[in-house]
Image: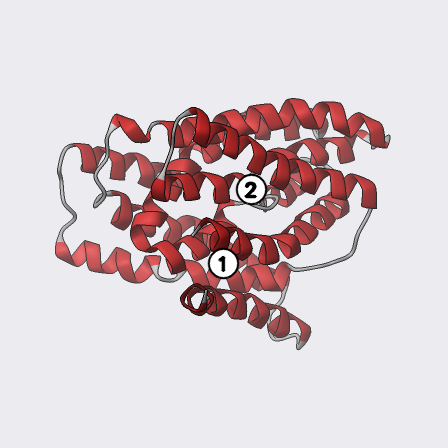
């Protein structure tokens, strides 16, 4: 317990620092947007290249991305049924669907790195491949459908310019063909990848906002994302007989909070941005408490 707390506490303190820096007006949401861009385009791809090129891959890990994708699909059908009980406007209903599906695996990455090291992060990245692929295709389509009803070119551009997805493809090819990164590039990517945790948790604290709109719908959306997700993860780890570190990765990732892309897609496609912000922030608050506890009990 003490060892686990020592590993997780610095991650939570960086989140708290982000809240403080926002409160004293040293940083704003515009700064957090810049931090998130650095995470997405630089730190996350660098971490993926360093970690996945070094782990031993086999067909035995194919269940990781498949599990993530299936959880998203099942969550969509569950949210479609539950969301109709709240008389939400079309833009808010779109947010409810999107928020219930997107796993905030980026939120769990700092915890995986702190507790499980690069091996845990690498396997979490494989799980996130299934999550990210559906988020940038199926989930984004849902956002477009309930929002501005535009955007096939934007979708294609996002897929073509998604550096984490390209990094994952490159890392998988290098791993399977036994190509190693040159020492200089490996050290460079290691340094860049080390920015992931501080940048992500700082931006998380800066974005944090506890204003609640449509309380019942927020509670239902969070329950679908985190607790239905955990239930589905538990079903799959038993169905596929997943044990050890992979079992912990699946259970923790499947119960991750509502993803930040919920707010991104709401902004891009004219969905209900205030409802999206409320859903994401309150889910993150629960995740700050729930995720470390889950890691403790699974460990």
Q: Residue at x 52, y 57 (%)?
A: 292
**Neighbours of disc 2 within 10 Å: few (<14), some (14-19), many (20+):** many
Q: Which residue is mark 1?
A: 200
Say which mark, if any, is on residue 72.
Answer: none
Q: Residue at x 76, y 28 (%)?
A: 82
Vertical relation: 92 (above or below) 105: above
Q: Nearer the viewer, mark 1 or mark 2?
A: 2
- Number of marks in the rendered image: 2
Seen in the image, is 180 located left or right of residue 230? left
Q: Is residue 98 at least partly visible in the picture?
A: yes
User: Front-most of 288 and 41?
Assistant: 288
The spot of residue 205 in percent (x, y) is 60, 63
The spot of residue 289 in percent (x, y) is 60, 58
**Neighbours of disc 1 within 10 Å: few (<14), some (14-19), many (20+):** many
User: Front-most of 231 and 210?
Assistant: 231
Residue 130 lies in quadrant:
top left
Q: CA distance from mark 1 to mark 2?
A: 19 Å
The spot of residue 186 in percent (x, y) is 20, 55
The spot of residue 90 in percent (x, y) is 79, 29
Vertical relation: 7 (above or below) 261: below
Q: Residue at x 33, y 51 (%)?
A: 47
Q: Which residue is mark 2?
A: 255
**Residue lying farthest to the right in this orientation:** 87
């Amino acid at each position: 317990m003490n060892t686990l707390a020592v590993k997780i506490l610095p991650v939570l303190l960086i989140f708290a620092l982000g809240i403080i820096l926002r409160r004293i007006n040293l940083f704003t949401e515009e700064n957090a947007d810049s931090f998130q861009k650095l995470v997405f385009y630089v730190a996350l791809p660098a971490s993926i290249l360093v970690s996945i090129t070094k782990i031993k891959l086999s067909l035995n890990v194919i269940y990781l991305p498949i599990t993530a994708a299936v959880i998203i699909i099942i969550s969509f059908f569950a949210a479609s049924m539950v969301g109709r009980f709240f008389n939400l406007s079309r833009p808010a209903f779109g947010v409810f669907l999107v928020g219930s599906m997107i796993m905030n695996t980026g939120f769990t990455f700092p915890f995986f790195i702190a507790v499980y090291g690069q091996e845990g992060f690498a396997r979490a990245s494989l799980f996130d491949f299934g999550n990210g692929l559906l988020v940038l295709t199926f989930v984004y389509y849902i956002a477009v459908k309930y929002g501005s009803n535009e955007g096939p070119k934007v979708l294609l551009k996002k897929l073509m310019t998604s550096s984490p997805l390209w990094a994952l493809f490159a890392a998988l090819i290098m791993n399977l063909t036994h190509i190693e990164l040159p020492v200089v590039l490996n050290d460079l990517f290691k340094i860049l990848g080390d920015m992931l945790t501080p940048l992500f948790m700082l931006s998380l604290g800066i974005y944090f906002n506890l204003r609640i709109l449509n309380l019942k719908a927020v509670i239902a959306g969070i329950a679908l994302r985190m607790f239905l997700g955990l239930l589905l993860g538990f079903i799959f780890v038993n169905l596929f007989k997943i044990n050890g570190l992979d079992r912990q990765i699946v259970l923790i990732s499947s119960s991750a909070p509502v993803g930040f892309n919920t707010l991104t897609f709401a902004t891009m496609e004219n969905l209900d941005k205030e409802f999206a912000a409320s859903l994401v922030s309150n889910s993150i608050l629960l995740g700050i408490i729930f995720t470390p506890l889950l890691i403790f009990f699974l460990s």
